[in-house]
Image (spheres, grey):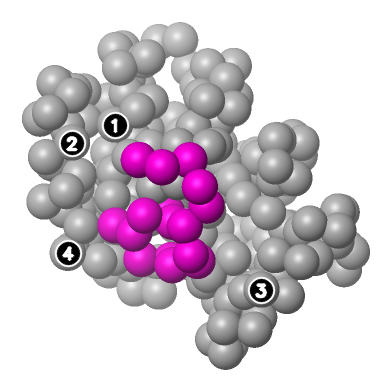
């Protein structure tokens, strides 16, 4: 695949999403190596999309069992194909999980059955309203010491942390889709607080992104 940046396209199987995923997967892997448990456990990915990330991470954690999920069942065949192609035996079949529909959360597993949940590059093209569902779902599915990692570009307390993030926000906003644009960490913190979670760590990442680590309130 060309290293040139493709045109903006949020579809999970687009060239743009593949380009962005290849660019961020190594820094994310570094965070996961530090944060994921060393003992056998279950890990859930929300909005897995094409499955590129979960299939890249899984071979580095043979003791963990990864569970992809997405609200769009169109991507399931691609996720399963990648798992077969990469011989990733520690990845379950994808399940339908819609953060706006609590009934689907039970498709992922029993309450308190995951040591970690992660979600990558979703909020710039999703309404902030799904934050409430994400936090409620995480509170339901995470074990007592588990964490939710949300990765992507964000505003911080109403401020763009870099000029490039401001430009990216303007590009997204100009597409004419009301929910597109960089969301604010403050809104995620507010949603988390409503469901017994809090921001434990805000990690600066390359390309002006953040890894936001949420866990249960102390």
Residue for point 35% across, 28% down? 56
In the rendered structure, the answer to whether residue 38 lies left or right of residue 83 reads right
**Residue behind mark 2:** 82
N-terminal label among 4 and 1: 1
**Residue behind mark 4:** 74
- The residues tagged by marks 4 and 2 sit, at their Cα atoms, a distance apart of 14 Å
Element under disc 4: helix
- Residue neighbourhood size for the residue with mark 2, other residues' Cα within 10 Å, grouped as few (<14), some (14–19), many (≥20): some
Quadrant of image for the C terminus: top right
**Residue behind mark 3:** 171
> Cβ–Cβ below 8 Å for labels 1 and 2?
yes
Residue for point 45% across, 37% down? 22
Residue for point 87% across, 54% down? 161
The foreground one among 72 and 23 is 23
Quadrant of image for the N terminus: top left
> Is 121 a magenta residue?
no
- The residues tagged by marks 3 and 2 sit, at their Cα atoms, a distance apart of 31 Å
The magenta segment: 1-17
Disc assigned to residue 149: none
């Amino acid at each position: 695949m060309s290293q040139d940046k493709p045109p903006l396209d949020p579809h999970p199987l687009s060239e743009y999403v593949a380009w962005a995923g290849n660019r961020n997967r190594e820094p994310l892997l570094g965070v996961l190596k530090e944060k994921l448990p060393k003992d056998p456990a279950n890990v859930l990915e929300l909005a897995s999309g094409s499955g590129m990330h979960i299939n890249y991470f899984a071979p580095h954690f043979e003791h963990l069992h990864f569970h992809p999920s997405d609200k769009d069942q169109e991507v399931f065949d691609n996720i399963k194909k990648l798992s077969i192609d990469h011989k990733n035996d520690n990845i379950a079949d994808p399940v339908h999980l819609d953060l706006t529909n609590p009934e689907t959360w039970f498709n992922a597993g029993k309450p308190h059955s995951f040591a970690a949940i992660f979600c990558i590059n979703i909020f710039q093209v999703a309404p902030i309203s799904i934050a409430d569902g994400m936090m409620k779902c995480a509170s339901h599915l995470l074990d007592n010491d588990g964490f939710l990692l949300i990765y992507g570009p964000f505003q911080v307390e109403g401020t763009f942390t870099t000029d490039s993030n401001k430009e990216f926000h303007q590009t997204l906003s100009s597409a004419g889709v009301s929910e597109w644009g960089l969301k604010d960490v403050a809104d995620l913190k507010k949603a988390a607080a409503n469901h017994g979670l809090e921001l434990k760590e805000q990690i600066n990442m390359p390309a002006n992104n953040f890894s936001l680590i949420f866990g249960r309130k102390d």
